[in-house]
Image (cartoon, rainbow, N blue to C red):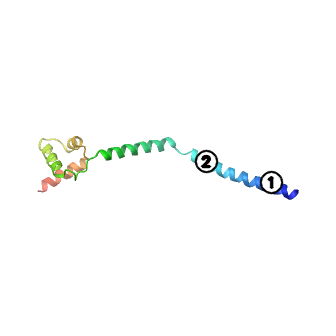
Amino acid sequence: MEFFLILLLIIDIVMIGIFFFFYIKLKKILELPWEEIKESIERAKELVERLEKLKPISENKMDLKKEIALLAKKGLTPKEIAKKLELSEAEVELVLASKKKF
């Protein structure tokens, strides 16, 4: 009978240890900055949507280069051209720089 009680006591101690271990793990999960994670996911979704909207420069490369050159001749700044054509300012500056070389 004593052996059975000692065995039950050992099992209880082990179970308490297991519950404590899982409590610590669960507590770490609950303490995660869930709002920041949610905001990061939303920002990532927005960036993906913006990337999907961007038209690749290689699609109509010649037309786009001509359009950039035409807008530059009209006096628009690279920043204004980039905004109008939904490109990055660096892309516009690169096209304009390549036009000057030829």
Near mark 2 (Cα within 10 A), the count class, few <14, some 14-19 or many ≥20, is few
- Residue shown at the point (76%, 55%) measured from the top left: 11
Disc 1 residue type?
Leu
Residue 43 in picture, x, y percent from top left = 40, 43
The dot on residue 26 is 2
The local secondary structure at tag 2 comes to helix
Q: In the rendered view of the protein, which quadrant contains the C terminus?
A: bottom left
- Would you identify the image quadrant in which residue 39 lies? top left
Q: Residue furthest right?
A: 1
Near mark 1 (Cα within 10 A), the count class, few <14, some 14-19 or many ≥20, is few
Alpha carbons under labels 2 and 1: distance apart = 25 Å
Identify whether 95 is placed above or below 36.
below
In the displayed structure image, the side of residue 9 where residue 29 appears, left or right: left
The dot on residue 64 is none
Q: Which mark is first along the chain, 1 or 2?
A: 1
Residue 72 in picture, x, y percent from top left = 14, 44
Residue at the disc numbered 1: 9
- Residue shown at the point (84%, 56%) measured from the top left: 4
Q: Nearer the viewer, residue 27 or 76?
A: 27
Residue 42 in picture, x, y percent from top left = 42, 42
Tell me whether the residue at label 2 lies in contact with that at label 1, contact meaning CB atoms closer than 8 angstroms: no
- Residue shown at the point (80%, 54%) measured from the top left: 8
